[in-house]
Image (spheres, rainbow, N blue to C red):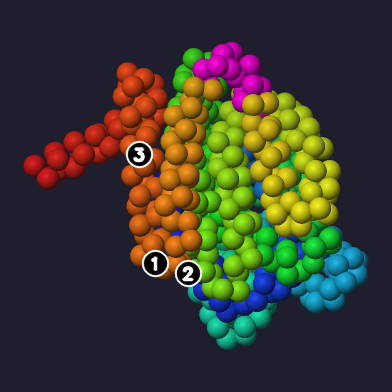
Amino acid sequence: MISMRLVVRFIGLVSTLILVRLLDPGDFGIIAMAMTIVAAIELLTAFGFDITLIQDQNAGSDEYNTAWTLNAALGGASAILLIALAYPAASFYEEPRLVHIFQCIALASIFQGLQNVGLVDFRKHLQFQKEFLFQLIIKLFSFCVTVGLAFALRSYWALVIGTVSSRLMGLLLSYRMHPYRPTLSLAAIEKVFGFSKWLLVNNVLNFIRFRGPEFIIGKMLGISNLGIFVVSYEISNLPTTELVAPINRALLPGFSKISDDMERSRDAFVQAASVLALLTLPIGFGIAATADLFTPIFLGQKWVDAIPIIRILALFGAGVAIQSPIGAVLLALGKPKLLGILSAWHAMLLIPIIIIWSKSGGLEGTALALLVTYVGFLPVYYGVAARSLGMSFSNILTVFLRPVVAALLMYFFVSYAFDGKAATLLNLSLAVSSGVVVFTLAVFVMWFLSRRVATSAESYLMNMVLAYAEKARKKAG
């Protein structure tokens, strides 16, 4: 699933690198303004019915039809609300162009709400190859439409039309790829809402945590700064989020299937957390160490102001990645309320810090506020997860020791060795390759010194590589 997802996101990365050269920061900024409000409205109607169907292993046609009916109704409600808020939002941001953008994006909400609920089965029954194909076709279609229009229009309208057209393609493709045909029904509304109401609360709080900074930047620091922040966030978090997304999409149905076996759940959680740390920490620290090299090469000189923001947000992305399996395990254990409480405390701490630090430190202050609050809350999240699983918090701390130390060694080595070097592909290649070598050597030296712990992520990945090698050898023989 990770390998296939990387293909999809590689297309997204190529698209971003092309678009930043065709469009101005202001184009990204106005779309970020619009999509922040769009995301707020959609999250207010995002009850996570798909997660409810995945968590309930006995869900039948009543539950599926009810979920589809509610999604369709909420998609229509979102569209109406977007149209109603078009003029007030334009007035709030003092940006009249937002009116027509909102009216077009309203169509996307309708298309999303009508999507075939049967697609949930791909995740529920771990048929991720089918989900990958679904996502790949949509991404290729969106890439062709958006980039083609960007060349033709050189305007933010390429992003708007690309968004609407990709949602339409998703709607049509969902009924082509899955045979389920939903019908209007509210037969299981009490059962579906009983679990989903807490998912709505958590979705709203997640929106505040992840999209709240964009509201603040757009209002306090202006459209160009918002464009820089959005692109910096996308570039710096792309590798880590695209490793995390497929893993977490597998974790939720996987944890749900074994939620009645606490010992297996504990082992799976520790293994997932350790693998995520081993994979994402070097990426986050590596992006931070090489930001001054790759930014001028891939984004161009007009984006050099984004370098310090990319550096900070790359570390933030690594923190988000290693926190992510907690949500999957708490939902699988049937504890969405507990997850919502954690998100509420986090949001109440984050927003005031962002406002204060944005005033004093600008974009860097905003990025630092995100990083500091996430790192500070990690022990809280993992402490709650450990208690829910009936395990020691110290057992979880050992999961992160080796990858954190190795990532720090890599960061300081690359930063020192390539400080002041010219931003060329050769220097960037040397920095990346040397960082990979330093991190790998550091991790495996510490692993050997710890007597090659059998339950570690290093052992898991080593066994997986050996298994694939053996399978390839037998096939060749």
The numbered mark, 1 or 3, whose residue comes first in the sequence reads 1
Image: 441 above or below 130: above
Is residue 414 in the magenta section? no
38 left or right of 295 in image: right
Which amino acid, mark 1? Leu
Which labelled disc corresponds to residue 440?
3
The numbered mark, 2 or 1, whose residue comes first in the sequence reads 2
Magenta residues (range): 381-396
The percent position of residue 419, horizontal first and vertical second, equals 48, 56
Residue at 84% across, 62% down: 219
Q: Residues within 10 Å of mark 1 (few under 14, many from 20)?
A: few
In front: 278, or 121? Answer: 278
Q: Residue furthest left?
A: 477
Residue at 55% across, 28% down: 256
Residues at marks 1 and 3 touching, judged by CB atoms closer than 8 Å: no
Element assignment for label 3 = helix
The percent position of residue 49, horizontal first and vertical second, equals 67, 41
Residue at 89% across, 65% down: 92
The percent position of residue 257, horizontal first and vertical second, equals 51, 27
Residues at marks 2 and 1 touching, judged by CB atoms closer than 8 Å: yes
| Cα separation between marks 3 and 2 | 26 Å
The percent position of residue 62, horizontal first and vertical second, equals 66, 38
Element assignment for label 2 = helix
| Cα separation between marks 1 and 3 | 22 Å
Secondary structure mostly seen in magenta is helix
Which amino acid, mark 2? Ile
Q: Residues within 10 Å of mark 2 (few under 14, many from 20)?
A: some
Which labelled disc corresponds to residue 174?
none
What residue does disc 2 label? 297
In the rendered image, which quarter is residue 95 located in?
A: bottom right
